[in-house]
């Protein structure tokens, strides 16, 4: 993402906004202090020579000039990040977290994942401490065993909402143990992780796709009607299609999948070139026939395409989706996050210890409001997708039904 932004929008100024969707899960001052301290310490992070060498060998799509940029890159949180604590009027000692970062898109794009991980870990170190790491590796192993025996190609996507760094490390160790035992006798496997640090540590493939903010930013600057196609074309300019097309998984739900497929039908050659799609909101069982119908209209056999599912997945959901994907003829892959790296029970009573449901979204670019219109009505609330009037206006432009929230 950063390399693409650096190529096409090196001067764009942006603002990102944090939202806590977990009603009733408030922060205390110790937690806020820990968040501020950890964010400020990001200024000490830099790419080591060993890490750069590993990227050169394992991420050959990174150009030398980008790796040079990355080696010189430094976070500047004291200039770019604002953290505010808003005390609760009805819950003394607790309050809400407000968090924003502003600056060049090329510089601020890397904050989202570490900042979300920082917020989650601080919360479970200072607010909800009624949990333990005991059994974490074994639980991940058992989940991996079930998924791999069920033919699931799994990508570990759990960095942003993980309970802690140690949690994610143990989860990957458990998944690797299951992979070693079962991948040779089944079609399931651990394909990789979206955490490049752990990919380096465990010699895994770093895996990710285009994020919503790529479409959101381009749409705000260039217009919404053809934003999906323009975003994919600009991506191809940075990452030309290859035989594997590992970076060519199109995210469909930035402005609803219905709008995406309407756009895609206008460009059959692009649809043929791209390896597949990513489903990240709405009902995946509704998405599968929608995607199949679009490909068949384009004269493309679904068996030649991959669908990556990544919305709030757990073991049972993955297995259910795989059955439907197989029946439709699609290849499928599964990006599983929070249900792996933040699945805990309270020590005191054995009840589920709920993870934080937090997001950081691109709020504006060059002064223009950014929006997202998800396939999931709950995720499409104006508080999470931009200014309410802007959401309504863009829905009308794209022909998306306007539903009162």
Image (cartoon, rainbow, N blue to C red):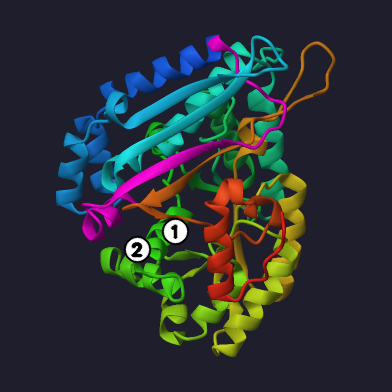
Could you say which is closer to the camera, residue 274 or residue 404? 404
- Dot 2: element: helix
Residue lying at 67% horizontally and 30% vertically, measured from the top left: 355
Is residue 306 highlighted in magenta?
Answer: no
The answer to which image quadrant residue 20 occupies is: top right
Q: Vertically, is 219 above or below 359?
A: below
Query: Disc 2 designates what residue?
Result: 221
Q: Vertically, is 280 above or below 260?
A: above
x then y, percent, for residue 101? 38, 35
Q: Which mark is residue 216?
A: 1
x then y, percent, for residue 21? 65, 37
- Determine crowd level at label 1: few under 14, some 14-19, many 20+ residues with C-alpha closer than 10 A: many
Residue lying at 67% horizontally and 67% vertically, measured from the top left: 402
- Determine crowd level at label 2: few under 14, some 14-19, many 20+ residues with C-alpha closer than 10 A: some
Q: Which mark is residue 228?
A: none
Q: Vertically, is 192 above or below 125?
A: below
Residue lying at 64% horizontally and 17% vertically, measured from the top left: 133
Q: Vertically, is 195 above or below 216?
A: above
| Residues rendered magenta in the picture | 1-29
């Amino acid at each position: 993402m950063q390399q693409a932004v650096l190529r096409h929008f090196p001067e764009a100024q942006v603002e990102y906004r944090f939202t806590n969707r977990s009603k009733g899960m408030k922060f205390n001052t110790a937690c806020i202090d820990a968040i501020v301290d950890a964010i400020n310490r990001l200024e000490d992070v830099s790419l080591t020579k060993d890490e750069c060498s590993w990227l050169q060998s394992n991420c050959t799509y990174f150009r030398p000039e980008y790796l040079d940029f990355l080696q010189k890159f430094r976070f500047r949180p004291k200039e770019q990040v604002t953290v505010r604590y808003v005390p609760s009027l009805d819950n003394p000692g607790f309050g809400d977290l407000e968090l924003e970062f502003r600056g060049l898109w090329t510089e601020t794009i890397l904050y989202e994942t570490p900042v979300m991980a920082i917020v989650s870990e601080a919360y479970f170190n200072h607010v909800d401490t009624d949990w333990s790491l005991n059994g974490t590796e074994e639980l991940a192993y058992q989940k991996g065993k079930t998924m791999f025996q069920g033919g699931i190609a799994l990508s570990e996507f759990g960095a942003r909402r993980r309970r802690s760094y140690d949690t994610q490390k143990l989860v990957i160790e458990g998944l690797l143990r299951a992979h070693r035992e079962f991948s040779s006798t089944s079609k399931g496997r651990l394909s990789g992780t979206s955490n490049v640090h752990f990919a380096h540590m465990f010699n895994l493939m770093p895996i990710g796709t285009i994020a919503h903010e790529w479409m959101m930013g381009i749409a705000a600057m260039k217009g919404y009607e053809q934003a999906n196609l323009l975003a994919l074309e600009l991506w191809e300019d940075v990452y030309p299609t290859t035989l594997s097309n590992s970076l060519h998984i199109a995210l469909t739900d930035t402005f609803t999948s219905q709008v995406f497929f309407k756009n895609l039908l206008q460009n059959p050659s692009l649809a043929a070139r791209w390896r597949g799609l990513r489903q990240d909101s709405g009902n995946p069982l509704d998405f599968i026939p929608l995607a199949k119908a679009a490909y068949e209209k384009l004269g493309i056999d679904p068996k030649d395409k991959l669908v990556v599912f990544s919305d709030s997945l757990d073991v049972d959901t993955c297995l259910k989706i795989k059955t439907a994907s197989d029946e439709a003829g699609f290849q499928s892959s599964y990006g599983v996050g929070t249900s792996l790296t933040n699945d805990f029970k309270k020590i005191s009573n054995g009840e589920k210890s709920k993870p934080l449901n937090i997001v950081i979204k691109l709020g504006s670019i060059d002064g223009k409001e950014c929006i997202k219109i998800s396939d999931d009505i709950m995720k499409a609330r104006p508080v999470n997708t931009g200014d309410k009037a802007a959401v309504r206006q863009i829905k009308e432009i794209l022909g998306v039904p306007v539903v009162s929230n």
